[in-house]
Amino acid sequence: MQVPQTPGQSSHNQWMRACHQCDLLLTRALAPLGQKLICPRCGATLHRNMARSIAHTAALSVSGVLLFIPTATLPLLEFSLFSFGAENTLMNGVQSLFAAGYIWLASLVLFCSVVAPLGKFLLLIFVCWGSAYQRLQRPVAAALRWYEHLQEWGMLDVYMLGILVALVKMSDLGKMSVEPGLYCFVAMMVVASAVTVAFDPETVWARMARRRENAGAGNPGTPDLEDAS
C-alpha cells in the first residue's frame, strides 16, 4: 500500500526531508509497517518500511558471514592445461599481486573483495544487535556511518564479472572446472543483495529513539530483534 507524503510547513520543531528526485520539502516520517511513503509531486518512493526489517537483516548478515568462510578458503575455479593444473581461490589473486610487487593494487583488490564485504556483514550484525540497547547508541550510530562508507566499496559483482571473463576467455586454452567455492561465492552475492534490500537505516534510528524515550521515562523495556514500527 502506498501512502502519499504531505508537504511540511517550516517550523523549528519539525523535521523536514527533501525528495531525492525533485527536492520537494516534506514532513519527515516513517512509513506504516508494510507500506511505503511516496512523493506527491514526482511519485518517488521516499521510505519503505518492510516488516521485520531488523530481524531479516540480522539473519541475512549472519548467513553472509557463514558463507564468506568457505568462499575465502575453498577453490573457485580449477584450470588445467596438459599436465599443468592450478586452483584459484579468493586470496590467490591478491597473493600473486603482492608477490609481483603491486602493493597498492593488491591492497585495493583485498579491500574491495574481502575486507569491505565482510566488514558490511559484521557491521550490520552489530547494528541489529546493538540498536536494542540504549547504552550502545553511539557505537551503533558510528557503525551505521561506516556501513554507508563501505557500501560503495564492496565490489563482489566486479569480482564475479572477472570470474565470468576468465571462464569465457580461458575455456578454449584448457579445461576449466567450477569448484565449490564459486557456488558459495554466488550464494554470498545473493545474500548481500538481499541484505541491501532488507536493511532500512531509518527503522534502526526509530528503534533507538524509542529506546531513548523509554529510558528517559524509566521504562527501558526488554531488548528484542523485532521491528515495532
Image: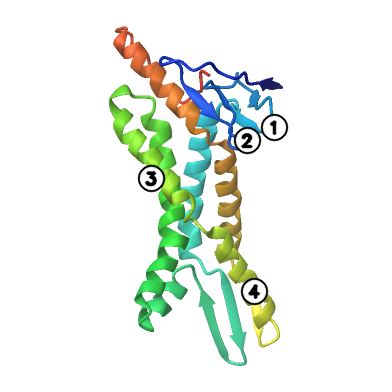
Which residue corresponds to the image point at 52% horizontal and 69% vertical from the top-left?
75
Which is more N-terminal, label 1 or label 4?
A: 1
Q: Is residue 116 above or below residue 56?
A: below
Amino acid type shown at disc 4: Val
Asked whether disc 2 touches disc 1, contact meaning CB atoms under 8 Å apart, the reply is yes
The residue furthest front is 10
Residue behind mark 2: 22
* Residue 207: % across, % down: 44, 22
Amino acid type shown at disc 3: Trp
Give the alpha-carbon distance from disc 2 to disc 1, as whole Å: 7 Å
Q: Is residue 74 above or below residue 145?
A: below
Task: Say left or right for 216 vs 14.
Answer: left
* Residue 208: % across, % down: 39, 23
| Nearest to viewer (mark 1 / mark 3) | 1
Q: Nearer the viewer, residue 132 or 178?
A: 132
Q: Nearer the viewer, residue 147 or 224?
A: 147
Which residue corresponds to the image point at 59% horizontal and 70% vertical from the top-left?
162
* Residue 188: % across, % down: 55, 53
Q: Is residue 134 above or below residue 166?
A: above
Asked whether disc 4 touches disc 1, contact meaning CB atoms under 8 Å apart, the reply is no
At mark 2, the secondary structure is: loop
Which is more N-terminal, label 1 or label 2?
A: 2
Q: Quadrant of residue 176?
A: bottom right
Residue behind mark 4: 165
Q: Is residue 139 above or below residue 213?
A: below
Amino acid type shown at disc 1: Cys
Give the alpha-carbon distance from disc 4 to disc 2, as whole Å: 39 Å
Residue behind mark 3: 146
Residue behind mark 1: 42
Q: Is residue 199 visible?
A: yes
Tell me the crowding category of disc 2: few under 14, some 14 to 19, or many 20 or more residues within 10 angstroms, Cα based.
Answer: few
Asked whether disc 3 touches disc 4, contact meaning CB atoms under 8 Å apart, the reply is no
